[in-house]
């Protein structure tokens, strides 16, 4: 297999889209491989790279079933539950703390 075609930022031809652009159209890559890539130059680091997929090979997004909605709700509830006190924090627990704010800073919250 040959190398992927590389396009400069904002200069990709029609017929290609990123995952986000596909999703905005109600599509998904659908098992196809990356067809091309975009490169956005940066001054102090390597270029930013975005992968492109062919729009004509994309498939419609699968609809959400009741079981998928339930699984998503369960996963979001788990992200809100503090592992230390086991309470629903009312917000997604920050990964940097690993627990709710009152458990992470007990002295600050008691005052």
Image (spheres, grey):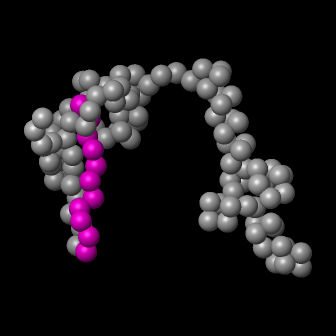
Where the C terminus falls, by quadrant? Answer: bottom right
Q: Is residue 6 rendered magenta in the image?
A: no
Q: Is residue 15 left or right of residue 85?
A: left
Where the N terminus falls, by quadrant? Answer: top left
Q: Which residues are magenta?
A: 44-54
Expressed as whole percent of the image width and height from the top left, the position of residue 2 reads 10, 38
Q: Height in image: 57 above or below 44?
A: above
- Whether residue 25 is visible here, answered yes or no, is no
Q: Is residue 60 left or right of residue 56?
A: right
- What predominant SS class does the magenta segment belong to? strand
Which residue is at 38% across, 28% downward?
Answer: 27
Expressed as whole percent of the image width and height from the top left, the position of residue 47 reads 23, 62
Expressed as whole percent of the image width and height from the top left, the position of residue 63 reads 52, 21
- Whether residue 93 is visible here, answered yes or no, is yes
Which residue is at 75% across, 61% downward?
Answer: 100
Which residue is at 24% across, 24% downward?
Answer: 56
Q: Is residue 72 left or right of residue 59?
A: right
Q: Nearer the viewer, residue 4 or 14?
A: 4
Expressed as whole percent of the image width and height from the top left, the position of residue 36 reads 19, 41
Which residue is at 33% across, 27% downward?
Answer: 31
């Amino acid at each position: 297999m040959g190398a992927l075609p590389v396009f400069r930022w904002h200069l990709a031809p029609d017929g290609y889209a990123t995952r986000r652009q596909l999703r905005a159209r109600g599509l998904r890559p659908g098992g196809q491989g990356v067809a091309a890539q975009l490169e956005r130059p940066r001054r102090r680091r390597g270029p930013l790279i975005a992968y492109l997929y062919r729009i004509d090979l994309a498939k419609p997004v699968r609809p959400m079933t009741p079981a998928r909605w339930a699984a998503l709700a369960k996963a979001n509830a788990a992200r809100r539950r503090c592992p230390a006190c086991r309470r629903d924090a009312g917000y997604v627990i920050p990964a940097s703390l690993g627990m709710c704010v009152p458990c992470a800073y007990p002295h600050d919250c008691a005052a």
